[in-house]
Amino acid sequence: MKYYGFSPSFLQSHGPLSWQHMSWALGHGLIGWKDLVQYANTGPKPSGALTEAAESLRNLDKESAHRAYELADILAGTEAAITDDEKRHRWMLLTLDWVLANQELFKDPLGEVEEIYADFGYPQEIAPLVRYMPPTDGWQPEEHSAEVNLARLFRLWADFVERKRCEYGWQTQ
């Protein structure tokens, strides 16, 4: 998967994210060790024996960055289990929201959607946002200009993200 450089404020506005979510994202390349350190400094504070792992994570530097996976897994191991499907789904939605909100940073935002679609296992839920997928809602692309078809995809994408923001209670950035 691709590293997108999610801002700490974006992740906070899309929480709460668990240590399991963060560990999964680290393991799949969506975030890096510095992002995990930032989360350790701003996210939920563990208690008891875990304070040592959390403190170690907060103080990671380049030389000790190799410990990020281990420390994230220790913290994730104390939480109620979350399925990989749920973690994958949450990060897919976060990534779609991030790219939409920051589309000016991307040469081809709809190309990013296609990459997200592939990276997350071709989920049917987002197939209508993908340029090369045939419409399933009766839309006839051949009856419209390329500009109208592209505008429709952006509108579908924005509507999808807005529904998910409402569903999850996320704040708009």
Image (cartoon, rainbow, N blue to C red):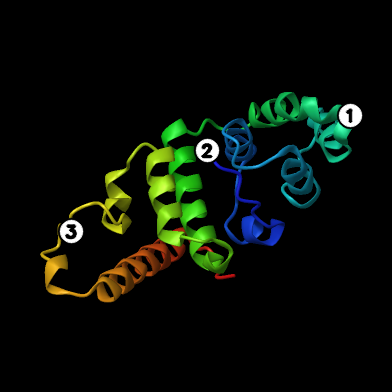
Residue 170 numbered tag? none
Q: Which x, y percent locates residue 119?
A: 43, 39
Q: Earlier in the sequence, mark 3 or mark 2?
A: 2
Q: Is residue 47 left or right of residue 161?
A: right
Q: Residues within 10 Å of mark 2 (few under 14, many from 20)?
A: some
Tag 2 residue: 1
Q: Residues within 10 Å of mark 1 (few under 14, many from 20)?
A: few
SS type, badge 2: loop
* Residue lying at 54% horizontally and 59% vertically, measured from the top left: 98
Q: CA distance from mark 1 to mark 3?
A: 50 Å
SS type, badge 3: loop
Tag 3 residue: 135
Residues tagged 1 and 3 counted as in contact (Cβ below 8 A): no
Tag 1 residue: 63
Residues tagged 3 and 2 counted as in contact (Cβ below 8 A): no
> Does residue 44 lie above or below 77 as drawn?
below
Quadrant location of the C terminus in the rendered image = bottom right
Q: Is residue 13 left or right of residue 49?
A: left
Residue 49 in which image quadrant:
top right
Q: Residues within 10 Å of mark 3 (few under 14, many from 20)?
A: some
* Residue lying at 86% horizontally and 28% vertically, measured from the top left: 64
Q: Is residue 63 left or right of residue 130?
A: right
> Does residue 71 lie above or below 47 as drawn?
above
Any part of residue 51 in sight: yes
Q: Earlier in the sequence, mark 2 or mark 1?
A: 2
Q: How many marks?
A: 3
Tell me the amino acid under the disc marked 2: Met
* Residue lying at 36% horizontally and 69% vertically, measured from the top left: 154
